[in-house]
Image (spheres, grey):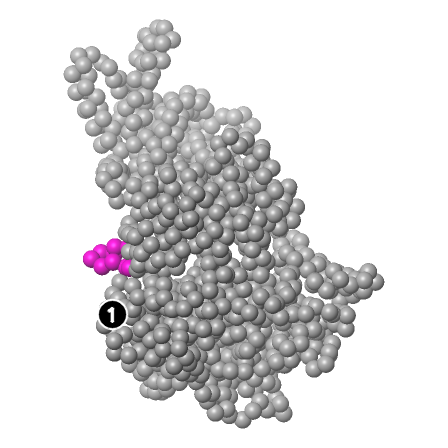
Amino acid sequence: MTDAPLLEVRDLSVSFPQGADEVRAVRGISYTVDQGEFLGIVGESGSGKSVSSMAIMGLLPRNAVVTGDVLLRGESLLGRDDRELSRLRGKEIAMIFQDPLSALTPVYTVGDQIAEGLMLHDRALSQQAASVRAVELLRVVGIPAPERRVKAFPHEFSGGMRQRVMIAIAIANDPDLIIADEPTTALDVTIQAQILEVLQQAKEMTGAAVVLITHDLGVVAGNADRIAVMYAGRLVETGSVDDVFSRPEMPYTIGLLRSVPNLVTAGRTRLVPLEGRPPSLSDLPPGCPFEPRCPISVPECTTAEPPLLVLGGGHSAACIRAPEIESGALQASDVFPRPEPVSLGSEIGSEQEPVLTIEGLVRHFPLTTGMVFKKQIGTVKAVDGIDLQVRAGEVLGLVGESGCGKSTTILEVLEMTRPQAGSIRIAGRDVADLSRSDRLSLRKDVQIVFQDPMAALDPRLTVGDIIGEPLTVHGDSKMERRRRVAELLDLVGLEHSMSSRYPHEFSGGQRQRIGIARALATNPRLLVLDEPVSALDVSIQAGVMNLLEDLKARLRLSYLFVAHDLAVVRQIADTVAVMYLGRIVETGDVGEVFARPHHPYTQALMSAVPIPDPEAERSRERILLDGDLPSPTDEISGCNFHGRCPLYKILDPSRQQQCVTEDPRLRMIDTTSAACHHVEQNTLQPL
Amino acid sequence: MILYGVRRFINYLVLTLLATVVGYVLASLVLNPAARFYGRNPRPSDAAIESSLRRLGVDPHKPLLERTWDWMSGIFLHGTFGLENNLDPVGHDMLVRSGVSLQLLLIGSVLGAVLGVTLGVWGAVRQYQLSDQVVTYASYVVLSTPVFVIGVLLMILATSFNGWAGQQVIQFTGQYTPGLSGTWNVLADRLSHLLLPTIALAALGAAEYSRYQRNAMLDVLSADYIRTARSKGRTRNSAMIRHGVRVALIPMSTYFAYSFGTLIAGSTFLELIFSWHGMGELALTSITQNDVNATAGSVFYLSILVLISSTLAEVLYAALDPRVRI
C-alpha cells in the first residue's frame, strides 16, 4: 500500500462535441479524497458536478472526451477499458443515483438486483448465499420485513425505500468509495433526513469515503468534512466545511450562502439575490466565468480565468480578489449587500374581511375496482375537513409532505364549485352558489403560479401573448392588453422588448417571473403559489422570493403559498398551516409555530430540514420519523399520525390508548393551535 | 396470472365471434353466389340455380338474418361451416389447408421475430455505425418491396442456383414432391420446399420488427437503470443485454400481436406464388368464385389466429412486465 490518497482527480476535463462546437462540461478540476473522508461537491445544475463523477466511474457516453487523470490509490483509471473498470465498479467504487424511481430495473426483484452486484464480484457465491446476504443488506438499510420485501419489485416500494435499496446495492461489496449523486433531491424532507442517516451509517459500517454531490448547501453542512464548490465546470472554492461556510472567499460561494433561506434566520432578513445566470458551456468568455454576475469584479477579471489559489488552512478559492476577502478588507456583506425592503404598504388589516375562508373542506375520492360494474373498495381522504383563512395582504404557508393533500386543497379552491362538504368563501362570496358568469368574474380575483415554469408556459406563444392571455378571456381590448403586458413586465423586473420573445429564450428564474406576470394580469386579490421556487436553482430562488415579497407589499396581494421547503415558507409567510394526511395538524403565526412547534409532526418536519450552517447542524438532535406517509386508503383509528409519532413512543400506555382511540381536534395552545392530545407532555426538542 | 390470461382469452373470444358474424354478413351482402351460373352455357334454369343455392344455404329469398343464424348454429351445433361451391364441406377443407398455412406462418413469424429482435438490438447498440446503417437500409428495402416481388426474386435466384449446381437443390413449387418414400427423404423434401417462402416471410417480419426493436432499445439504452447496472460492475454490453433487452422486449410483445395481421397477408401472397394450397389461397379463390361459406370460413380462421396471437401477446406482456401482473 502506498501513501497515495484513495482518490485523486488531476486536471480532469470532459467535453461533449456538438457539431462544430463542444460543450466543455468540466474544465480541469483537481481534488483528492482520503480514506474514510466525506467530501461534499456543491454546485447548481450544469456546473459539471455530476459529469465529473461519472467520468471517474467511466460511465459517460462514448462521445465524451475525457482528459486529465483519475487515480485510485495511485493507479490510473482513465484509459482503462470497460472490462477492467467493471471489476472496480461496485467493488471499489460504488455509486448512488438521484432518481430511485428510474435507477432500478423495473423487471427484476430488488433482491435479485442486490444479489446481482454481489455475484458479479464473487463468482464463487451461490445464488442462495447471495439472496441471504441481500436480506441482510435490506435489514441494514432499514427496510421493514426484509425477508418478504426481498422478493418485491421496485414499483412496490416508495421513493425513500427505493433509495434505501440503492444504498444497499452500493454497500453490498464493502466499497472504499461511495459516490452519491443528489441522493435525496427527489425526496421529501422527512425521508431525506432518514436517507442521510442511513448513508452515514453505511459510511461508518464500511469505512468508505463518501463523495456527496448536491445543490443543497444544508445537506452538506451537516454531513461533509470538506466541501468543493463548482461553477461552470470548474472548482471555484474548496476547504473544510467550517472554513467554507464561515469564511467563504469566492464571491460565488458568498452569494450562494447568502441567497439560501435558513430555517433559523429566515423571515428576519431579506434574501440576497444572485442576479444573472451561469454562462453557456459551449461559448465561454475568456475571463472568470462568474465575472458577469460578480458584484466586485474588476477589469482584470475579464482577461484570464483565475486559478484555484491556495489560501491558509487548506482553503482555496478561484478569485483574484480572494486575498482581500481573506484579509478582511472586503466583507461578505460588502460583496453581496442585503437589499432594502420596499416600503411596506399598510400592515395586515385584521379588521378586513378575509380574502379566502375555508371551513370544514372535505374532498374524498372513491377507490373503485372492476371495469364495467364498479365497486367501491375504499376511500382516499385527500382532504378531510380543514379550516383555513387568508386575510387581505397576508401570506398563508401550507406545508406538508407529498401526498398530504396540499394540491387537492388548492385545486378545490381554484375549482370554485360546491365542495363535497364544508364551504369555500372567496372575497366574502360562497362559491357554492355562484352562477357561471359570476364564477368567471370571480376567477379574476384568484390566480395561480405553478411549480415548473418550463412546463407551465406554452412554448409556441410569445411572452406577450402568454401574459395577455388571461385578459383575452375576460374580454379586454388589444390596446389595453398591450399596455397591461408592458406594465406587468415592468412589475416583475423584465424588459418591455421581451414580450415578443418565446419562453425557451429565458432562464428558469425569468420564466417564473413570466408566470407571475401572467397571474397578475387580471389584478387578482389572491395568488395561489404552488411550490413557486422549488424547481429553480438556489441562486435564482432568492430573486423570485424577493420579487414575491415586494409584489405583496406593493399590490396588497394575499398569497396561499404551498411549499414543502420550510425555510422558504418561514421566509415569506405570515401564518402557517401544517398538513398531514388531509388534516391540518398545526397552525398559527409563522414566528410562533417555528419558534415553539407543539405538534410532534411539525417538530419532526422542522428537525428534518438541513440548515446551511455546519455548527448548528452538528449540535442538532434530530427527531426522525419512522417509515413513509401511510397510504391514504388506510383506515387509521384515533390520531392518524400515531403510527409514525415520535412522541407516541415515549408516552405511557394509558396516554397511548387515547392516541389510538380518540381523533384529536385542533385546539389552542398558547397562541397557536395544534391537533395533539399530549402537547403538555411533549418533551421533544426540535432544532 | 393464469386467471389474467383466461380473462383476456374470453375477451378476445367474444371479439372473434363478432368478427365471424360480421364476416358472414359482409360476404353475403357483397358476393353473389348465383353469378357463377350465369356464364354457363347452356345457362341452368332459374329453378335449378335456386335449388343449388338452397343446398349451399345461401338462398337469396331467405332473410339474411336467418341465413346468418343457420350458419352460426351450424358451427356451434355441428361444428360445420357449410358447403363450398363444389359441395365439399368448408370445415374439412379448412382443416387440411390451415395445416399447410400454419407450417409456413409459424416458422416464418417466429424466425422473423427472433431475427428482427436480434437485428434491432444490434442496430441500437451500434447506433449510426456502419453495421447499423446496413441493417437500416436493408430493412427499408425489404419493407418497401411488395412481398410477391420478394417471392419472385427468390425464385429467380433459386433457379440460377439450381442451374449452377446442376440439379434441383432448392424446390419451390408446392409443398412437397409427390411419390417420395423414406422418412428422411420426405423430411428433406419438405424443408427444401419450405425454404424460399419461409425466407420471404421471415424477411418481411424481421424488417418490420427490427425497426421497432431498435427504437425500443434506444429508449432503454439511456435509462438510469442501465447506468446502475454498470455501476454495480457490469460491462456495458452485459448491462445492455441483461437489463436493457429484457425491458425493451415489453412493448414488442404488443407489437407482435398487431403485426401478425400483416404477416398473414404476406403469407397469402406467398401461398399463391409458391403454389401452396393453404388458407390464403382458399380466401382469395372463394372471393373470386362468389363462395359465401368459404369466405366466411376464412374470416373465422383469420380471427382465430388473431385471437390466439393477441392472447399470447398479453400473456407474454404479463410475463415480461411484473408491473401489470395482478
Q: Is residue B20 left or right of residue A671?
A: left
Question: Farthest right residue?
Answer: A654
Question: Farthest bottom residue?
Answer: A346
The residue depicted at 25 percent of the width and 74 percent of the height is A302
> Which of the pair B107/B15 is nearer the observer?
B107
The residue depicted at 38 percent of the width and 74 percent of the height is A251
Q: Is residue B302 left or right of residue A425?
A: left
Q: Label 1 amino acid?
A: Ala
The secondary structure making up most of the magenta span is: strand
The image shows residue A264 at horizontal and vertical percentages of 57, 75
The image shows residue A48 at horizontal and vertical percentages of 36, 60
Q: Which residue is mark 1?
A: A304
Q: Dividing the picture into quarters, in which one does residue A287 lie?
A: bottom left
Q: Specify whether residue B68 is in view.
A: no
Label 1's element?
loop
> Which of the pair A522/A574 is nearer the observer?
A574
Q: Chain of mark 1?
A: A
Q: Dividing the picture into quarters, in which one does residue A89 lie?
A: top left
Q: Specify whether residue A332 is in view.
A: yes
Q: Is residue B253 left or right of residue A593?
A: left
The image shows residue B144 at horizontal and vertical percentages of 24, 40
Locate the C terminus of chain A and report the quarter of the image it occupies.
bottom right
Locate the N terminus of chain A and report the quarter of the image it occupies.
top left
Vertical comparison of A272 with A245: above or below: below
Q: How many marks?
A: 1
Vertical comparison of A589 with B120: above or below: below
The image shows residue A488 at horizontal and vertical percentages of 39, 84
Which region of the structure is painted magenta?
A16-24
